[in-house]
Amino acid sequence: MKLRFAPSPTGLIHVGNARQAIANALYARHYGGRFLLRIDDTDVARSREEYVTALQADLQWLGIEWDEFVRQSDRLDRYALAIEHLKATGRLYPCFESEQELASKREARIRARKPPIYDRAMLKLTPQQRAQAEANGKVPYWRFRLSDRMVRWDDMVMGESRVKLPSISDPVLVRADGTVLYTLASVVDDIETGITHVVRGEDHVTNTGVQIDIAVALGVAADHFRFAHLPLLLDEGGGKLSKRFDGLSLRSLRQDGIEPSAIVSYLARLGSADDPEPMSFAEQAASYDLSRVSRSAARFDMRQLLGLNRRIMHTMSFEEVRPRLPEGATEAFWLAVRGNVDMIGELRHWWDVVAGSIVPPVMEAQERDYLLKAVDLLPAEPWGPETWKTWTTALKEATGRTGKALFHPLRLSLTGEEKGPEMRDLLPLMGYDRVAGRLRIAAR
Ligand SMILES: Nc1ncnc2c1ncn2[C@@H]1O[C@H](COP(=O)(O)OP(=O)(O)OP(=O)(O)O)[C@@H](O)[C@H]1O
């Protein structure tokens, strides 16, 4: 068994792409198969080397390892051989129509209430007409003559699937400049690199019909590959994700401080019958089941991802996170805050709360005396976990305040936040001078 993830290096990969990478890698690991990373860079105008580097780094960050690596741009000679074969067997035919001619033919067909597919006019070209076109300086591009049949396959996610080839235009597989299109390159690669299972997005369903036909023309059986098409992942507003908009790229989630295992755990189970659970890659692989993925589109839910992230962070040791903590942050700080933040990015603020400075909150005038009293009653250092209790008990006795009236003005003055980690843990980290100073500022 061998699977592959085949992104085009045309932008930073997003959570939708990552969902496919994860599905392929987990399925391969689950069955002890191999996993190949293929860079689909036949579109020279849009492919960029920096995105190849970025996507490898992003996948490695997720914990995805590949057994083999190939690039389509290194395999052009293989495609040339396949092109020769398809020409020799009459499946590729030269075309000379311009974009404009094709557009007006399409309009004419729509007006005549016919499906706007290519009319195969060039199939009827005589050798003389072709020679004439070439003598006039025209260079052909090449279309693949699709079979007149229905292609069927048993999709591992979508179930019984079919594509009616006669209702699709014969696809262009070779451009006039001789470059190959993805549709052909992908089939040649899948055959020659020994891919057995093609797991990809639902946007490829029609492609699959065409590619099965091409694969058969290249000499393999119609059921040579098993296919799984996962529904596309939509953004929170129900829109399509794109490599061109950075919003849900792995890079931006990483910069926000989301844990890679939260992303893998979330995407592995998204749209499936099983709730996402924080697990390592190996644990995910052990329980991975493609047949439990739903056929309907899944929507990315940031709150669910953050919920998982929070659970994962809660169990992380100081040693694990140390390199990503603000400079100088101690283990006591990590233990105090880790259960109260959704992502590492939020720690900067809490470090400023205990060791730096914060924007002073605006307090109600009637809290003034209370806050000054709180300064008076601050216990002398050294402070420990019991200091908060000792202090607030003394304040309660001196002022008669209880509950929210007792605690809330203190938390707000000292942290600038309504909620957050336990004050019991934060107070000793802040120290007498910072606490007294903040209370005095808040009382102004
Ligand atoms: N929103 C999405 N949800 C799930 N899978 C997706 C989504 N968008 C793309 N994919 C899948 O990601 C894989 C990599 O494809 P590809 O690199 O062509 O992505 P793409 O985002 O469609 O790229 P481009 O925008 O450059 O065409 C394919 O299996 C594709 O089906």
Image: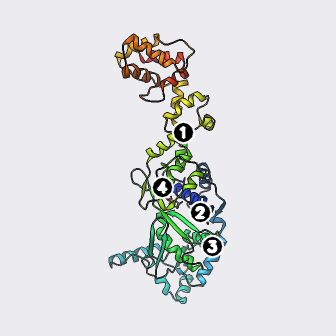
Residues packed near mark 1 inside 10 Å, few (<14), some (14 to 19) or many (20 plus): many
Task: Residue type at mark 2: give it.
Answer: Arg
- Looking at this view, is 333 or 272 the one in front? 272
Residue bearing the label numbered 4: 242
- Quarter that holds the N terminus: bottom right
Dots 2, 1 in contact, CB < 8 A: no
Q: Earlier in the sequence, mark 2 or mark 1?
A: 2
- Is residue 412 visible from the viewing direction of this image? yes
Task: Residue type at mark 3: give it.
Answer: Tyr
Residues packed near mark 2 inside 10 Å, few (<14), some (14 to 19) or many (20 plus): many
> In front of the other: label 2 or label 1?
1
Q: Residue 430's spot in the image, x, y percent?
A: 53, 21
Q: Which mark is residue 313?
A: 1
Q: Which mark is residue 79?
A: 3
Q: Earlier in the sequence, mark 1 or mark 4?
A: 4
- Looking at this view, is 217 or 308 the one in front? 308
Residues packed near mark 3 inside 10 Å, few (<14), some (14 to 19) or many (20 plus): many
Using the image, determine if residue 155 lies above or below residue 371. below
Residue at disc 4, secondary structure? loop
Task: Write down the quadrant of residue 138 in the picture.
Answer: bottom right
Dots 3, 2 in contact, CB < 8 A: no
Find the distance from the CA under tag 1 to the CA under tag 4. Answer: 29 Å
